[in-house]
Image: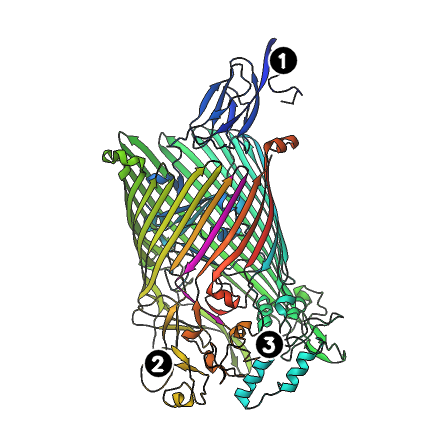
Amino acid sequence: MPDSGLGAGSPVHHSVSKKLFTVIQVSGRVTGDKGEPIPGVSVVLKGTTRGTNTDADGAYRLEVPDTGATLVFSFVGYLSQEVAVGSRTTVNIQLAPDEKALSEVVVVGYSTIKKESLTGAVGAVKGADIIKRTTSNVQQALQGQIPGLTVLDQGAGPGKTNMVMRIRGITTLGANEPLVIVDGIEQRLADINPLDIESVSVLKDASSTAIYGSRAANGVVLLTTKRAAAGKVAISYNGYYALQKSNNNPVHMELGDYLKLQQVAWTNSTGGPGVFTDAYIQEYLNATDRLKYPLPNVWYDEVLRTAPQMNHSLSVSGGTESIRALLSVRYQGQKGIIPNSDSKIGEIRLNTDYQLSPKLKFGTDVNYRSNNILSPINEGDVFNKMLQTSQWTVPRYPDGTYGISSDGYNPLVSAELAGTARTLDEYLFGNFKGEWQILKGLKFTTQIGARITLTTGKSYANSYEVHDYFNPSVVRKSVPLNSMTESRNDVREYTINNLLNYNTSFGAHTVNVLAGYSQISNRGRSLSAYRQGFYSNDLKSIGSGTNDATKNNGGAEYTWGLRSYFGRVNYAYQDKYLFEANARYDGSSRFLGDNRYSFFPSVSAGWRISEEKFWGDLAQYVGELKLRGSWGKTGNQAVDLYSGLATLSLGVYSFNGLPAQTFQQTRIANQGLTWETTTQSNVGIDAQFLNNRFSLSVDYYNKQTDDILLTLPVPGTLGLLPAPQNAGRVDNKGWEFTVGAHNKFGPVGFDANLNFTINHNNVVNLAGTGPYITGGNETRYITTEGRPINSFWGYRTAGLFQTQEEIQNYPTMRTGVMPGDVKFLDLNNDGKVDPADMTYLGQSFPIYTFGSNLNFSYKSFSLSMLWQGTAGHKARIGGAIIEMGIWGGFTHKLITDNYWTPENLNARFPRPLKYDLRNFVMADRDLMNGSYLRLKNIQLMYQIPSTLTQRIGIGRASVYIATTNLLTFAALNEWNVDPETIPGGRTEQYPQTAVSTLGLNVQF
């Protein structure tokens, strides 16, 4: 109703059906049992649809008739109240908590369940907690949120993701990514807008995952998107502007120290200083013209930049009891911290629900997402050249000419001149879901989903020349031939789910029975083409390249399917004795004959001790106490397609000097290939203390994966490569702890959630094969019985040789060992140091993961912090950053005055050498503590008072500032290396960034 201009309580006369009545304006405030304001409370005039919602301060204002008016106050988690207005113009209300309604509902496989009735190990995160962190994908937002879930962010360019996500450790030697289900259909987390998420559940034990059978061995992530509620149209805007920067930039050794290091290294290797004589060093130090005497390495200052990122999301929702719809649109623009790097994401989602009759309803979902990514043609080469082969180079001369190192490189050339890669990733998801309430308690649900991913790529390598700045007639670098590769990838997947659910209660018994059928069909196609010799770098059409023997093209097609029958029975007696049984019968096209189908059962039970009569007075201290246990089996069908078939490979053979196309079998077919099977048991306890102010959850699990795929050796005389076989076994055992605290101290609110996980991984059986050793002298891993998967493998050391006498009295790895070289140990005491002396050096995946969500509120301010970390593992840095300038690469300042010389016998690092890696063979001395604790996100929000927002027609508004990756405590900090990067290897990938954000949330 338009504002009459009269004050609150002033009468307004209306004529309806020739009867006069007076309208008054009622206002007030709604608070909780502790006096805190409750925003979003529904205030409705009883018997009508006229109503409003309370603002951030719990305040409301509504026009009602002056006689006989009754207001109904309702909000989720609180008991509704009806209040007669009478002649009052101010009505303040205090709502009491509804203890039953406060029972959290958790999404599980094909259903939902009250948390108090849960018998499995399931972690849950609300959508409101996910959006507190400025992220471009959901995986980042899940870090540190749930015990048992390890998420490592290893950095990636704009629009890309490079995340490691594991549930309860490393399950197998192959693929370990969990199954992701969004609104009942398998999808990628990277394709979901974080602002569209209602909740996320992580299924960890077999009782909760077995309903997904052959795809659930690595755990399951269930994501539910938001849907509209009946009522007036709600419009919300969420936007932010952010700045990204790399906060792990190694610092190079100072000029004089680096020149001296090079002098010592050349002297140790050749007996003389090379060009690094005392006179040359002094000349270089005294020079002022850095175009002729460039500094050794300034690339982190010259290449990296602070990059903007912006996000705009708009959501519109509302409707009636018959039809409701939610429309959300988003645009995200993100620049990269290196040149020629950015992404533009645009997406739209429409979730609609229709209630055709009291017994029949259906819903449709449509989601389209476009991700347009630009990057240098070889993004990794940019970061590689910042550390290697680009020393003593002017980044760019005053006229724009690039400097070129003696090795022929410049990272800016790689970023700006070498070429670009453009990728367009388009994603379309459609979903239809219908529900028919056949009888009371009996419901049939059908769901049909389709997802289509179309990825097109165009990588263009430029032809170019770089001329000498001082003598332009000299060409310092020439790439005379340009080239382009264009690709198309099309993946289409269709899913059908049919569910029949029966739910009934009689007396103290509650029974829920689910029966279901699911079918998935997946088909993919790829096509690529290559041309070179384009007339101009501006011609980027594949048909413009040279049509000769250098052209190339390729393509592939594949298809696979999955057919499943499943069921579940839940039983509860008096809501305190709980039982659940799941079963799934899966058939996969990846397997043949009798191995095509497999059965995956699970059982679980729970006992709510706090519901027993004997609990009595203890309830005031421990309001909820539940014991639970589970056992079950899940599978893994992630084997290479067509592994059981005798496939043929295309080749070329010369007949009479002419090429002829051939086909040949290159690998043995294993028609007996079958599922990897994971058997898991779990026991847990859940407790709530002091009127739900504190909570505790503890789980112990034992997970055993059998029939792991291994490539067993075959005689070389067979002439074929061996086929994978089911033979191995890997165990994971561990503990999970969650502690929560929820309290209020006057105007200050406090909410905390802490989680801690311990996981021990062990390879039990490799069927007589192995060990499987990967990597090389720089970083080497081993997978062998009795050790965790991908453990570090190398030599043990005992410091540095100090004297020639010590060298003569101990075996060495090579001849020519001198004082200051590393002393590698002869572990088997055979009088020599060789690969037989290599041993286990530590594990690469964390034993411990932990996280904490801390939230504080004071009046209109709220502060949230997310801490996350890992421990119990090693990390190794490889490449130039640690090699002490051996190849003339980046040399970290940490090495300054800390390398061995006859005057510095207690040095940390060995004597410098040139072009000699004898002291940097994979060994324990180069492994570092990989543990870290990081402040992943901190956010300060201010809720703008409703007295201000309502003046301009806004229901609620808030502004916030936030920063990600603000603080990190780690041993790797001394090397300026991100501890979440690959645990062993070179620091030459696009780094994780720190993001500072200014944001605005508005609800109309």
Where is the N terminus found, in terms of image quarters?
top right
Determine the image quadrant of residue 472. bottom right
Q: Which one is in front, 301 or 533?
A: 301
Kind of residue at badge 3: Thr
* Residue 983 drawn in magenta: no
**Disc 1 to disc 3, C-alpha distance:** 85 Å
| Most common SS among magenta residues | strand
Q: Mark 3 = which residue?
A: 389
Where is the C terminus found, in terms of image quarters?
top right
Q: Earlier in the sequence, mark 1 or mark 3?
A: 1
Please state if 273 lies on the left or on the right of 524 as rendered. right
Q: Which one is in front, 561 or 140?
A: 140
The answer to whether 584 is drawn above or below residue 511 in the figure is below
Q: Mark 2 = which residue?
A: 836
Q: Mark 1 = which residue?
A: 13
Residue 989: percent from the left, percent from the top? 54, 66
Residue 810: percent from the left, percent from the top? 36, 87
Residue 701: percent from the left, percent from the top? 31, 54
- Residue drawn at 56 percent across, 52 percent down: 963
The magenta region covers 858-877
Kind of residue at badge 1: His
